Amino acid sequence: MFHKDNSVLWRVRPATFVPNAVQSNGEIHNDMNQMPGGVNAPLWLNNVQYTIGGGWIDINTAGGASLPNWHGVQKVNGHFYKIWDKGCAT
């Protein structure tokens, strides 16, 4: 099952795979796109969590940017991250 804001988005029966990793990403498709958020107005990714057996667990991994000269990321705590495009103010 895939959830967002405590609502079921997608239910698969029978389950055809067992997830073994979790990620939260902002992305661009080519270098003409703007990454969500700007230097002075980053995009907030809050409640970045997953569940196993009903309990919510913080993703709690380091933030990383595949293009660090273009994009910024800040891990605020175990479930809250900020991302931004370094070429845009807002």
Image: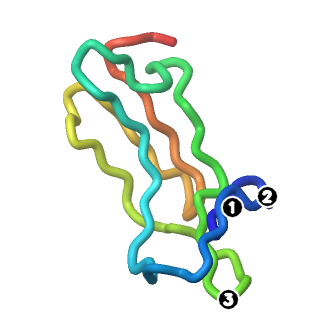
User: Which amino acid lies under the numbered mark 2 shown in the image of this protein?
Assistant: Ser
* Inter-mark Cα distance, 3 to 1: 13 Å
Q: Give the quarter of the image for residue 14.
A: bottom right
User: Which amino acid lies under the numbered mark 3 shown in the image of this protein?
Assistant: Gly
Q: Earlier in the sequence, mark 2 or mark 3?
A: 2
Left or right of 40, for residue 1? right
Residue 24 drawn above or below residue 19: above
Tell me, for residue 3, which label it has, or none: 1
User: Which amino acid lies under the numbered mark 1 shown in the image of this protein?
Assistant: His
Q: Between residues 28 and 9, which one lies in front from this camera angle?
A: 9
Residue 25 is situated, as x and y percent measured from the top left of the image, at 42, 47
Mark 3: secondary structure: loop
Residue 11 is situated, as x and y percent measured from the top left of the image, at 66, 68
Q: Answer yes or no: do the residues labelled 2 and 1 have beta carbons within 8 Å?
A: yes
Q: Residue at x 51, y 12 (%)?
A: 90
**Label 3 Cα neighbours within 10 Å, binned few <14 / some 14-19 / many ≥20:** few
**Label 2 Cα neighbours within 10 Å, binned few <14 / some 14-19 / many ≥20:** few
